[in-house]
Image (cartoon, rainbow, N blue to C red):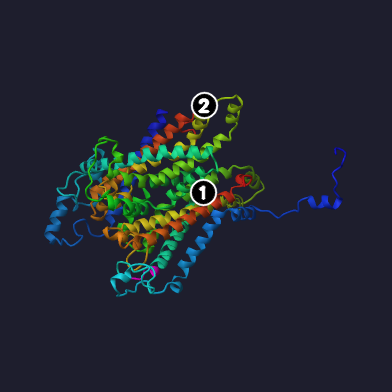
Amino acid sequence: MSDSPISSTPEQIVSLTPKPVKRSLWRDAARRFRRNRLAMFGLIMLVFMLSLAVFADLIAPYDFGRVFLTLRANTLPFVNSAHPLGLDGSSRDYLTRLIFGARTSMMVGLMVPLISFAIGVPLGAMAGYLGGKFDFLVMRIVEVATAIPPLLFALFLLSIVGNGVWNVIAVLAVTAWIEPTRLTRAQFITYRERDFVMAARSLGSSHWRLVFIHILRNTLSPLIVSFTFAVPLAIFAEAGLSFLGIGITEPTASWGKMVGSGIGNFIRVYYHIALFPTIMVALTMLSFSFVGDGLQEALDPQRADDQ
Amino acid sequence: MVGYLIRRVISLFLVMLVVSLIVFVLMNSIPGGPFSLGERGYTPDALANLERKYGLDKPLVERYLNFLIGAVQLDFGNSFSVAGSPPVTQVILRTWPVTLHVGSYTIALSFTLGILMGIVSAYRRNSFLDNAVTFTATLGITLPNFIIATFLLLIFGYQNGWGAPNKWIIPPLWDGGPAILSQDYFLPVITYALAPLALVARYTRSSVSDALGADYVRTARAKGLSERFIMLRHVLRNALIPMVTVLLPQIPNLLTGSLFIEVVFGIPGLGKFFITSIFSRDYPMIMGLVMLVAFFWGLMYLITDVLYTLIDPRIRLGASASR
């Protein structure tokens, strides 16, 4: 036994050496992300919600503002096949309202982080990269902004600028830029003094090259993760404000508003008014946070060995 | 240390000054005023009289200076919209205790249960219990609390008459049992606690499992120390340090109340009051509430930073200029 050599032909040895695989951070991340079942579920749900939002006009059976005059019993869900999910308090088709609600939620959910990152990332990058007086100024503004609770401030601003989808988006973006600013600044401060940046600088790289090629690329993955988590926060804020009756104005459908109009003493009979939009909000927020968790794990190189 | 504290307190008040200026200017930038709204329809003479009574006819700068002079003496003026126009501080003193009650039960529940859940799931990673905790945490973070509130009310509230709005009283802390068991508190506190509970459990889990993998724990095990001793002395002590910065800022948030919870359950607290005063354009109330919240949050951040240095001796106050 002991003297039997490991019998392996040269061909086998050759085949055992791993083939050189093209690997990059993004490729690895995509592989890790695909293996994460929850994250993939989130991604599928997210695509579903997005397509609801984009193709709402095509999918929805009716116009979102159309009022139906029908029997009281038909306003309940699962009774009348013309209105599978029943009608809302103003006798509008509930399925249609739900589908159009996806449009509002997605619009707010994506526009708010987009705007707030468009403000926060350059601001944080400049503060972190330049330092000095500019950094001091930005940090003082951030300090003032953190002293005001975001939701209260949004409410206050909305009472000034008035309701409506774009006003909600603007108001929420004004309160949401702090997080990306802080994150970007912190990232820029850590990377500014790293050896590879110093090396690039001593080789004569311009400031633009240092910022965009060397630093920003490295901060990209935390920024993406933070963006993904900012989306459900914005959706939550919109739903909440509309729930309180101060967000989205009436003909536009909004899940938060629908939940809000559903509560009251008649909720035991017309349960669908609160239940269905709740499911939609929960699914959307859940899918975004699954995707966010998945991205966080996939993009963090230190976690690469765990999986 | 003393110098640092003084600097921080000064900056806190500067921040409050700026906040008050911003809110004051924004608030007064909209056309109309608290008395030109709605269906009351005052005659121009009556309107002018009312505005003179509440000092709204004076120029903006003078009103702001008056506000500042009052605010320094903790006098924010009289409310416009509350019946009998009592002083703002009196209204706050009446409504804040309600919010404080709900908030402190919420903190107690979410922090104890959350830390426990986090520790258990860190010790039994990938077990059924861990998955259950992760699931609850995900739900707590992703489900908006007004939605949870709505359904708790639907399931438990209306049948049992719990949390029926508009009959809120502040129960004594101990009334034949802890007040949290009183029906008025039960549902709001559970709803309110879910999100912070999720956050606490999540952070505890990752923090404790980081500590469990550290060298000093291996050393302690190699020395043959009992697992209980290791947990209390080494793991928890080190794991709880980074959590202070995450958990303590939750406290001001919880103690100033949630708009949604208070609206859904009809709790007459600060949050609900803030909404009504915004919509009736009750300027002194808005200023008073904003100042209270800004001060409270700023103070809590300050306490967090100080506490952090007390727990972790490696950190020096004010040493890091670029934080």
To which chain does the residue with label 1 belong? A
Considering every residue shown, the one lying at the far front of the view is A1
Q: Residue at x 58, y 35 (%)?
A: B213
Residue A251 bears which disc, if any?
none
Query: What residue did someone put label 1 on?
Result: A184
Mark 2 vs mark 1: tell me if same chain. Answer: no
Query: What residue did someone put label 2 on?
Result: B229
Residue B30 image-quadrant placement: bottom left
Above or below residue A42? Residue B240 is above
Secondary structure type for disc 1: helix
- Of B306 and B53, nearer the camera is B306
Q: Residue at x 43, y 53 (%)?
A: A233
x and y percentages locating residue A53 in the rendered image: 45, 66
Considering every residue shown, the one lying at the far right of the view is A3
Left or right of residue B124: residue B148: left
Q: Nearer the viewer, mark 2 or mark 1?
A: 2
Left or right of residue B71: residue B85: left
Residue A305 image-quadrant placement: top right
To which chain does the residue with label 2 belong? B
Above or below residue A20? Residue A196 is above
Q: Residue at x 50, y 47 (%)?
A: A183
Q: Which secondary structure is most common in the magenta stretch?
A: helix
x and y percentages locating residue A193 in the rendered image: 59, 42
The magenta segment is A92-96
x and y percentages locating residue B298 in the rendered image: 37, 40
The crowding category of the residue bearing disc 2, from other C-alpha atoms within 10 Å (few below 14, some 14 to 19, many at least 20), is few
Q: Is residue B116 visible?
A: yes
